[in-house]
Image (tube, grey):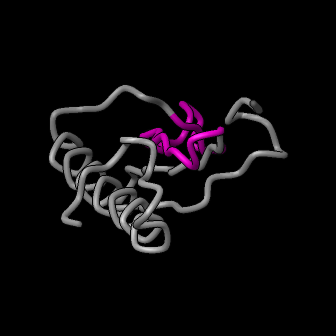
Amino acid sequence: MQQQGTTKNKPIHDIRLGLVKAAIWKHDNENGPWYSVSINRSYKDKDGDEWKQTDFFNRDDLLLVAKVADLAHTFVCEKLQERGSQDREGGNGGRFRGNK
């Protein structure tokens, strides 16, 4: 499995609110796809010349973190539900238990 920092494995979806971003990564195994999410905040360095990312958040970022996490959760659930509707007979590896 590729590390998410490499150029070969890119996120399948990004959700951005202000300076906070969630990147959603798709992985495949014998049970089908599964997803992971990374959340970070953009900021400019001391000189204000270069954008960087951190996984540390200020008090004022926390509601945005919660919202992008909520939106990422919805996206992943919808993706898993789509797979479940395509494969009702075989299940989905137990990763999502939606209404069947």
Position in image of residue 8 (x %, y %): 84, 46
For the point 19% across and 64% down, the residue is 99
Whether the magenta-drawn stretch holds residue 57 is answered as no
Residues 14 and 47: in front is 14
Residues rendered magenta in the picture: 30-53
The quadrant of the picture occupied by the N terminus is top right
Q: Vertical placement of 79 versus 65: above or below?
A: below
- Residue shown at 65% from the left, 39% from the top: 30
Depth check, front residue: 57 or 92: 92
- Residue 72, above or below 37: below
Q: Left or right of 81: which side holds 47? A: right
Please count the marks in the image: 0
* Residue 1 or residue 22, whichever sits in front: 1
The structure residue drawn at horizontal position 51% and vertical position 60%, both measured from the top left corner, is 14
Residue 33 in magenta stretch: yes
Q: Position of residue 23 (x, y in %)?
A: 51, 50
Which of 58 and 6 lies nearest the eye of the viewer?
6
